[in-house]
Image (cartoon, rainbow, N blue to C red):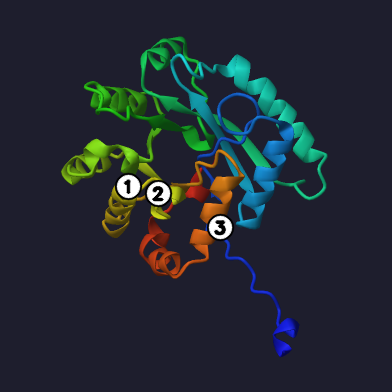
Amino acid sequence: MFNIFKKKKQDATLFYTTDVHCHILPGVDHGAQTIEDSLAMLREEKQMGINRVVLTSHVTADTFENTPDTLKPAFELLKQVVSETEDLRGMQLFLSAEYRIDEFWDKQYELGNQIAMPGNYILMENSFHQELLELDNLLFDLRVKGYKPILAHPERYGYYAQRHQRLEQLHNMGIKFQVNLLSLAGYFGQHCRETALWMAKNGMIDMLGSDMHGLDHAKVIKNYINSKEWNKLVPIIHSHIINDLVRD
């Protein structure tokens, strides 16, 4: 009967404060559709201990052919609304994108239309069907031009599940790997989860991202970071995570 007087257990927070991968910018991809969606998702980020958010909307041929001209107005609007919203005031927002390596990327890259994160990091999404033949050349070219390429959620590319040596090769080239918390939580299936855990145990997770597209994703992540499995994983990956080093 005395349980009603016990203090409610506080939800866990992440050990870093910067989300480097999310789809919270409104109306530009299949993430947040409205400002209200964006604010609700940012509140979820804040509850998880995040106070710096890099907005990485999709830039993909045919589906989301975003450019600075489509992303910047949405970013400025969201930033203004956040500054006027009492419980979110002080949250830092940064504009970047998740760039699918495809024909639209090739055109935009040639035009210099990429928007890097603070510190000149740039989030690259590979094809889900097969690794691109020119991947190594592109990643090398990006680095020569002063960018720091991050491979988005490599655990989700099925062709790496049985080719761990290729992940090792890419990582040894200096490419940063960003793994989704959703993958670790099993949201994308067992194979993705197993690859993500293998990467964790081998020191190959450099960044963690929510890849949040909606409140359903936030719920999965919050449940996961309150789990015993996450608590066991944190000491293994803590020293490798550089999210908070994404700064100018």
Residue sitting at x 31%, y 28%: 139
Q: Which mark is residue 222?
A: 3
Residue 104: which quarter of the image? top left
Q: Quadrant of residue 201?
A: bottom left
Tell me the quadrant of the picture where the N terminus can be found: bottom right
Tell me if residue 190 comes above or below residue 231 in the rendering. Answer: above
Q: Which of disc 1 and disc 3 is earlier in sequence?
A: 1
Q: Is residue 204 visible?
A: no
Which comes before the other along the chain, label 3 or label 2? 2
Earlier sequence position, callout 2 versus callout 1: 2
Q: Identify which amino acid the numbered label 2 is placed on.
A: Ser
Nearer to me, 116 or 68? 68
Give above or below for 242 relative to 166. Answer: below
Residue farthest toward the front in the current orientation of the protein: 1
Given contact means CB atoms under 8 Å apart, are the residues at marks 2 and 1 in contact? yes
Q: How many marks?
A: 3
Q: Is mark 1 on a helix, strand or loop?
A: helix
Real-space CA distance between mark 3 and mark 2, rounded to the nearest whole angstrom: 13 Å
Q: What's the CA distance linking mark 3 and mark 1?
A: 19 Å
- Image coordinates of residue 50 in percent, x first then y, are 61, 52
State the quadrant of the C terminus: top right
Is residue 80 something that shows in the picture? yes
Question: Which image quadrant is residue 24 in?
Answer: top right
Tell me, yes or no, whether the two marked residues, 3 and 2, touch with CB atoms within 8 Å.
Answer: no
- Residue at horizontal 36 percent and vertical 18 percent from the top: 102
On screen, residue 146 versus residue 159, left or right, reads right
